[in-house]
Image (tube, grey):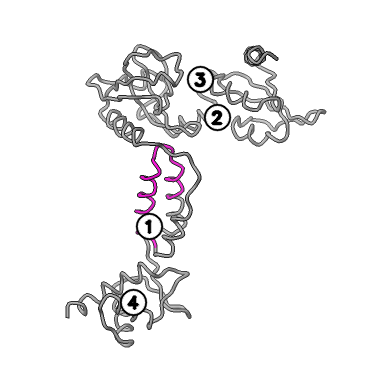
Amino acid sequence: MAGSKLKLLYLLDIFRRETDESHQLTVPQLIDALAEQGILAERKGIYRDIRTLLDYGVAIHKTASGYYWDDRPLPFGEVRILAQALEAAPFLTRRRTEAMVSSLSVLLSRHQAEALLSLALGAPKASNDEELRAMEILRSAMAAPCQITFSARPAMGWDDIPPERFGASPYGLIMQEGRCCLVCNLEGGDGLSILPLAGMVSIRRDATPWRPFPQVHPDAGLPFDARGYAQRQAGFCEGHLQSLCVSCKEGILSAILGRLSPASAPQKQRDGRFLVATEAAVTPELFRWLLSFGAELEVLEPMALREQICQNLRACRALYGA
């Protein structure tokens, strides 16, 4: 008796779990699925139940192959994007990622969930939840707002950060070069620092009020625009801009244009290389990025940056005894 009263609920669960646009169930299959739940049903009763669900507003569709439910909170493509974002997040462990992706599968049919779980990306993952816990502490401090204190890992090679514990005013979290980073103002210093969370340990909220962001960036207001700042960093636009001119081979031209975004089109030279002129802040990130292209890219100006690269290459040559 109880089973017959619950038949509509079981039937709705079957539609949600077993059907989608590519997987329909016929009336005999619906009867068999209910029988597996211990509920007896007949063909005429199934038709009446489907009509009742339709009258209630449940989006059940009929095709030549059977019936299926199509009223999910998110379409499969959007759930897949969310799953891929979780797979690519470097601050999540593999175990946590799999658990979160599995949680997303409740939004899908069983068939879609199986396809979703087979879409794992080969992305580097965290070995523990340390960065995730650090992010929660930082979000709490930024909401307060208050300073934080932390220590730096000696192995990170931050020459400008003292080994002892120190304070900072946190403004936002950004992704830079595949790492989660904190944008902050180090206590006692001016300007902004970008610190990888992987290099920060023992992060604690401090009762000390933070330094308001407009004091660090007089032309900026509150709140701190993390998305805009990350975009400017990706384009090497933060800080004092200088004229930058490089010559590069055609094979890396798309990578150069995607990062530097010059105002004018590149000019092809007689030797087949392309001349790219733009403006950029000469930062350590820009220096390392330019060096990564080796002989495929030549910095023409500014001369100070060109000389810095020459000195680096001479030092490397001396190191290897070439």
- CB under 8 Å between discs 3 and 4: no
Q: CA distance from mark 3 to mark 4?
A: 64 Å
Q: What residue did someone put label 3 on? A: 239
- CB under 8 Å between discs 3 and 2: no
Amino acid found under the numbered disc labelled 1:
Ser
Find the magenta span and give its range: 83-108
Q: Residue furthest front?
A: 321
Callout 3: SS: loop
**Mark in the foreground, 2 or 1:** 1
Residue in the image at 64% along x and 31% along y: 256
The image position of residue 144, as x and y in percent, is 25, 28
Q: CA distance from mark 1 to mark 4?
A: 21 Å
**Mark in the foreground, 1 or 4:** 4
Q: CA distance from mark 3 to mark 2?
A: 11 Å
Q: Quadrant of residue 51?
A: bottom left
- Identify whether 214 is placed above or below 174: above
Q: Residues within 10 Å of mark 1 (few under 14, many from 20)?
A: many
Q: What residue did someone put label 1 on? A: 105
- Identify whether 27 is placed above or below 107: below
Q: CA distance from mark 2 to mark 1?
A: 36 Å
State the predominant SS element of the stretch in magenta: helix
Q: What residue did someone put label 2 on? A: 235
